[in-house]
Structure formats: C-alpha cells, structure tokens
Image: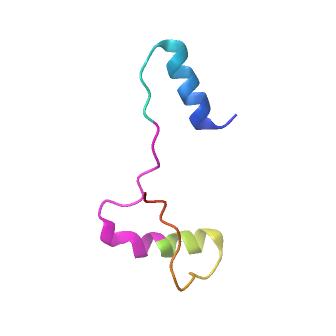
Amino acid sequence: MRLAARTVQLGDDLGVPVVVSNAVRYADSEQHRLADVLDAARLLRPIPPHGLDSGER
C-alpha cells in the first residue's frame, strides 16, 4: 500500500483529520527552472524543451 493511503488510514483509525499534499519543491514559483535542472540530474536525463512536469495543479 502506498504511503499516502497508509497515512489516511492511520488518521481514520486514530480519529485524526489528515491532509495529504505534494512535497514542497521550492519557495518561489520562479525557481521552477532550478527544480527542472535538479530533476534532470537526478533522473540522468536531458531537460525536454518544454521543461519537466512540475506537478503544480
């Protein structure tokens, strides 16, 4: 089972409200290019011309 699902289940079991969100990747939205570079380095891939998916919704 995934961590988020286990966390929600634990909250239900304990009667505690749970909020699940994405990890914070940068403090300012202008830093998205730095996050792209770090993701590309981590994945050992070039950065696509359109950039990487920031996951921001």
Q: How is the image coloured?
A: rainbow
Is 50 displayed left or right of 28 in the figure?
A: right
In this rendering, the count of numbered labels is 0
**What residue is rendered at 57% in x and 74% in y?**
40
**What residue is rendered at 61% in x and 29% in y?**
6
Which quarter of the picture shows residue 3?
top right
The stretch in magenta equals 20-35
Q: Nearer the viewer, residue 36 or 53?
A: 53
Q: Is residue 24 above or below residue 21?
A: below
Image quadrant containing the C terminus: bottom left
Is 30 displayed left or right of 51 in the figure?
A: left
Q: Is residue 21 above or below residue 18?
A: below
Q: Is residue 13 above or below residue 36?
A: above
Residue 37 x, y percent position in the rendering: 50, 76
Q: Nearer the viewer, residue 46 or 18?
A: 18
Residue 46 x, y percent position in the rendering: 61, 82
Residue 13 x, y percent position in the rendering: 55, 14
**What residue is rendered at 64% in x and 78% in y?**
45
Residue sitting farthest toward the right = 1
Residue sitting farthest toward the top = 14
Residue sitting farthest toward the bottom = 49
Asked if the stretch drawn in magenta spans residue 26, the answer is: yes
Image quadrant containing the N terminus: top right
